[in-house]
Amino acid sequence: MLRKMITKNLRYLPSLSALGLACYFSALPLASAEESFSANAGLTSNYVFRGQTQSDDGIAIQGGIDYTHETEFYVGGWASSVDEVNGGDGSGFEIDLYAGWAHSWDDFGLDIGYIVYEYTDKKFAEGAKEFYIGFDWGPVGITYYDGSDDAAGASDYNYVDVGLDIEMIDDVLLSFHYGRFSPDRGSSFNDFKVEATKNILEFDVGIAVTYEDGKSNQTGTKDTELFLTVKRTFDL
């Protein structure tokens, strides 16, 4: 799944240039693909999204389901328990619904889609919507998100995600991430993440450290998080 942060003041702004580019790539010949249906379940010591904890630095249970058609269009859903920081009473579950199309041409890949974030407890967050377009070339990837918050009076925002994956010895995947969140109103902020992941007995086990530079509206202070995640994916 593409992975997420909802601030309290965020609005969707369509990107015409990105949509035009998507139409161009959609016209290119497609390689044959197989239909797939899968589910995943996981547990993390801290649900961190775009550099900020969504579980008040506590354990979160997570899971999702994904379907990909042979045309490479996909739909899916993902959920996680959440808990508001600093003694807030917002909690419950985050539920993400998304759809898109992804294809690769040798070492080049394209992923275009739309994601909706909803929450069972509106005290935690009102929800948000994002259009995204991502490119990858070998181990390097970049994804642009154009979003809007459901809260009244919220501003539009965008988020840029840049990543690098390196295969290490013993099948360990080392991932580097940089993200920049830029709202129409308020301060922009940056987050960084380094994660090592290895498949152990059919479970994906990852340990990650993140840093957020403290300019977000949610925290106001620099934040470093270290957490462990265990996930398993099942073919259905």
Image (cartoon, rainbow, N blue to C red):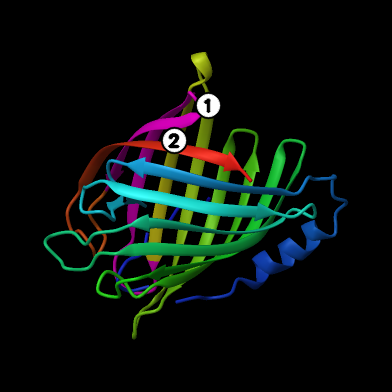
Amino acid type, mark 2: Phe
Q: Amino acid at mark 1?
A: Ile
Q: Is residue 191 magenta?
A: yes
- Which labelled disc corresponds to residue 166? 1
Above or below residue 58? Residue 188 is below
Q: Nearer the viewer, residue 224 or 40?
A: 40
* Mark sitting earlier along the chain (2/1): 1
- What residue lies at 18% left-to-right and 59% top-to-bottom? 85
Residue beneath the point at 88% across and 51% down: 29
| Marks 2 & 1, CB-CB < 8 Å contact | yes
Q: Position of residue 52 (x, y in %)?
A: 28, 53
Task: State the extent of the magenta-drawn residues as a range.
Answer: 183-212
State the image coordinates of residue 20 (x, y, percent, origin top left). 73, 67
The x and y percentages for residue 112 are 65, 59
Give the secondary structure at mark 2. strand
Which of these two is toward me, 91 or 52?
91
Q: Residue furthest top?
A: 169
Identify the residue at image location x=47%, y=63%: 96
- The residue beneath circle 2 is 176
Q: What number is the disc on residue 55?
A: none
- Distance from Cα at disc 2 to Cα at disc 1: 9 Å
